[in-house]
Amino acid sequence: MAPISLRDLRVQDQHTCLRLRDQLIRERYAVISLDTEDSHQTLEGALRRFEPNQTFRFPARDGDSCYDDSTKRCFEILYEAAVVCTRALWSSSPELRAAFPAIQASVGDALEEDFTLFSEETPHAPFSSTDAPFGHTFFNIFNYDHGMLNEHKDRGVVTAIYIEPGRLDTEAVSQLWVGRSEEDWVAMDSLVERGQLVIFVGEELEAMAHEVGLDLLAVNHCVRVEPRGDYVSYSHSRRDPDALPVGNRRSAALVLCS
Ligand SMILES: [Fe+2]
C-alpha cells in the first residue's frame, strides 16, 4: 500500500484527501510520508536523546515535563500532521463539514501563520489554555525497553505516530499491533519505512462519524510482543515480560483532541 504524501494533503489535493479517508475506513490505519528529511531527523533525534533517561515515557506521568527544542519540534511536527489529516477528512466528507463546523474552525486556527505552540508564557506546555485549537491534545515519547501498552483505543480525533522499529531479527520485541477484529491483528512496525507516520482514528472522530453515517472506527491497538496476550499490570513501568531487555521499539505519539 503506497504511503499518502503529507505534502499532497497539505495542499488539499482532493484525490489524496479521499485516499486518506478511504484507507482509514478500509484498513483502519494510514501510512503518511513526511515531506522533509529535516522533520524525520528531528523525530529520530528526539527519540535518540530520550534513550539515556532509561524510562518509559516523556512527559512522565508525574515529574519531568521539561520540553527542550527537540521535543517541542517533535510535538509540532506530529500536531501539524494530525491537523492536516483532520482537515483532509473534513474536506473529503461534506457530512462531517455540515455537522461539525467547530472542528473545521479549529483546523483553520491551528494552521494560521500566527498560531504558536509553546509560547513564551508557557514554554513547557504546548497550549497556553485549553481554548487553543485542539487544546486537549497530548503527546508522548516512549521507550518500550521500559514499558508496554495493553489493548486500548485512543480518545481523540486522530492519532499520529512516528516509529523507530526495534530489532527486526527477532519476534521477542514489542511491536505496535492494530486489531481489526479479535483474530485480525496487523503488525505495524515492519510496515513503515524511514520518514513515515502512522495515522489512526480515535474515539472522538468515531462518535462524530457515526452520527453522520460514516464508518471511521476508533482502532484497537496495543504495544507488546504478542497482541493476544493476557493483560499486563504495571505496564507503564515494566516492559512486556516476553520481550528482550533491550532492542525494543521507540516511538512518539500525539493524540489530537478537541
Ligand atoms: Fe494509543
Image (spheres, rainbow, N blue to C red):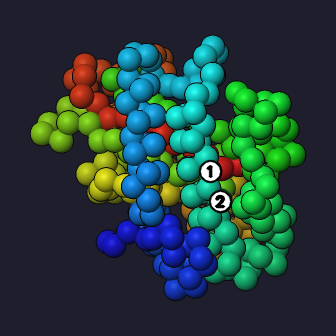
Q: Looking at the image, which residue is at 31% across and 53% down?
A: 194
Q: Looking at the image, which residue is at 87% across and 46% down?
A: 131
Q: Of residues 190 and 107, which is closer to you in this image?
A: 107
Q: Looking at the image, which residue is at 48% across and 39% down?
A: 252
Residue 18 in percent (x, y) is at 54, 81
Residue 96 in percent (x, y) is at 74, 74
Relative height, residue 161 to residue 146 (above, below): below
Q: Of residues 254 and 33, which is closer to you in this image?
A: 33
Q: Cβ–Cβ below 8 Å for labels 2 and 1?
A: yes
With 75 as the anchor, is 208 left or right in this view? right
Quadrant containing the N terminus in the rendered view: bottom left
Would you say residue 154 is visible in this rendering? no
Which picture quadrant has residue 196?
bottom left
With 109 as the anchor, is 10 left or right in this view? left
> What's under tag 2, amino acid-wise?
Val
> What's under tag 1, amino acid-wise?
Tyr
In the picture as drawn, the residue positioned furthest to the bottom comes out as 15
Under tag 1, what secondary structure? Answer: helix
Residue at which label 2 appears: 83
Q: Looking at the image, which residue is at 58% across and 85% down?
A: 14
Residue 10 in percent (x, y) is at 58, 71
Residue at which label 1 appears: 79
| Other-residue count near label 2 (Cα within 10 Å), few / some / many at <14 / 14–19 / ≥20 | many
